[in-house]
Image (tube, rainbow, N blue to C red):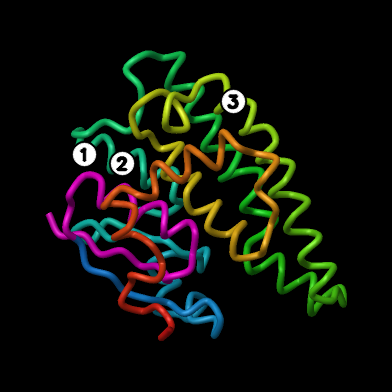
Amino acid sequence: MSLTLHGYWRSTTAYRVRIALALKGVEYAQVTHDLRTGAQREGGYRALNPQGLVPALDVDGAVLTQSPAILEWIDETYPEPPLLPSDATGRAVVRAMAATIACDIHPVNNLRILTTLRAGLGADEAAVNRWIARWIGDGFAALETSIARHGDGFAFGATLTIADCHLVPQVYSAERFAVDLSPYPHLKAAADTARALPAFVDAHPDRQPDSDPT
């Protein structure tokens, strides 16, 4: 099976997929689409992903989109180690944690929205940063409670799940925009535990072949 991940080094959604692939030990090729130049909207890529968004995972010509769906495909196709709990209630809790990030935090803070705030609505950088901190803060407050209740080293329990695949990239984004994480000690501890592992290190944006020179 041949896998090609279409993404961008600083995309948190592509970051989620890189983490899952690394945890499963799956080899894949990467094709970059620089979001800063609008490369994801070019015709050749839109033929693969009509939304013109990253990531997309090309699996022997079948193109998968939307990172939550891609993560579940990875987990079903490469079942070891599992990234969802064995019980239905645990799976629902983990999926809810992941959805808090994928549905409630990330969509209102992605590049399309921030560009509209700046160019379409005239927001300055201070206003944009307040916007980012507001929505990350709302989501992280809920996640802090969930992780305090369900976590045991990681976001849920004592093993990695798709919740961690979502959490670590979102913490990376929060730190990039200087969001204060001190109100979320359980969340921060879970993210720190996960991102110290080799798979998370390898998936980090700064380690990607298309990353900006330091």
Relative horizontal placement of residue 204, taking residue 119 as reference (left or right): left
Residue at x 30% of width, y 48% of height: 197
Disc 2 to disc 3: CB gap under 8 Å: no
Q: Which residue type does callout 1 highlight?
A: Thr
Check disc 3 and report the residue beneath it.
146
Foreground tag (2 vs 3): 3
Image: magenta residue range: 1-27
Where 127 sits versus 192, above or below?
Answer: below
Where 42 sits versus 164, above or below?
Answer: below
Nearest to the observer: residue 134 or residue 115: 134
Find the residue positioned furthest to the left. Answer: 1
- Image x and y of residue 128, in percent: 78, 67
Relative horizontal placement of residue 138, taking residue 15 as reference (left or right): right
Sequence-first disc among 2 and 3: 2
Q: CA distance from mark 3 to mark 1?
A: 28 Å
Q: Which mark is residue 63?
A: none
Callout 2: 10 Å neighbours few (<14), some, many (20+)? few
Q: Which mark is residue 73?
A: 2
Q: CA distance from mark 2 to mark 3?
A: 25 Å
Q: Hey, which quadrant is residue 91 in on the image?
A: top left
Check disc 1 and report the residue beneath it.
77
- Image x and y of residue 74, in percent: 28, 43
